[in-house]
Amino acid sequence: MFLAFLLVMLVATLVLFTITRVEVETIGRHHYLQRVSFFAAHPLQPGDIAFLGDSLTAGGNWDELFPGLPIRNRGINADTTVGALQRLDGITRGQPKAIFMLIGTNDLPWYEHRHDEMILSTYQEMLDKIKTDSPQTRVFVESLLPRAHLYASRVRGLNAKLQELAEKNGATFIDLYSHFVDAKGDLRAELNNDHLHLLAPGYAIWAETLQPYLDSLQDR
């Protein structure tokens, strides 16, 4: 009797998880299409600097952090490398001066079924597309940020591979990770309130780290 009860509870939990996951994916898909629609209505122009990413990028008020620079925020909450690749046309079509990419942390949870080689393969597709469609655009690949301890080892390993990939493709790799990680490999506690997203001090560190690379664009 007790085993039957446990089985029923397990099935109910799985059903609830599936329903919740489907609903979350539906909401995420709607949001993705809403943002893509907005971006299409406000296309990039030559000379613009695109910040391509997920909620970490979307959450930054880059026009306030870098006043006077033509930065266009192209972050979308919950986006993955696959989503970024799908909307890359809308960025390369504008022939921007530079693209700063921080994408991939949403590929890591187990339910996405995305192992490192799949993530890196999608990155390679993005780099190839930029090189083909907008060859004058400078590309900056930013390391993934640390997050909860569960992901510590994987984030470190993936960042090492991303650096190799960027250098192989003539892109500039930017190490954000070392500025945000604590001694245990987690995102520094004072920079977040949910083990993933940044508070204002985190964005200040991010902006400070990017400043020399943005300065280099102004010299060209």
Image (cartoon, grey):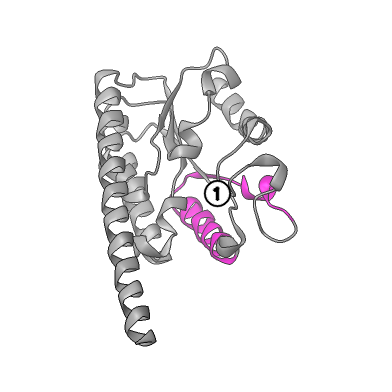
9 falls in the magenta region: no
- Overall secondary structure of the magenta section: helix
Q: Quadrant of residue 152?
A: bottom right
Q: What residue is shown at x 60% (from left), y 52% (from top)?
A: 146
Most foreground residue, 42 or 37: 37
In the rendered structure, the answer to whether residue 110 lies left or right of residue 143 reads left
Number of callouts in the render?
Answer: 1
- In terms of secondary structure, where does tag 1 sit? loop
The local crowd at label 1, few if under 14, some if 14 to 19, many if 20 or more residues have their Cα within 10 Å, is many
| Residue at 43% over, 60% down | 109
Position of 25 relative to 32 (above/below): below
Q: Is residue 175 magenta?
A: yes
Residue 159 seen anywhere in this rendered image of the structure? yes
Q: Measuring 42% from the left and 51% from the top, which residue is drawn there? A: 106
Q: Position of residue 1 (x, y in %)?
A: 34, 87
Q: Relative to the observer, which residue lies in front, 156 or 200?
A: 200
- Residue 118, position in %: x, y? 35, 62
Q: Is residue 173 above or below residue 204?
A: below
Residue 130 or 102: which is nearer the viewer?
Answer: 102
Q: Quadrant of residue 133?
A: top left
Q: The residue under label 1 is which amino acid type? A: Ser
In the image, residue 165 above or below residue 110:
above
What residue is drawn where x is 31% and y is 53%? 20
Residue 101 drawn at (x, y percent) = 45, 40
Residue extent of the magenta highlight? 153-182
Q: Say which residue label 1 marks.
A: 143
* Side of 165 where 41 appears, left or right: left
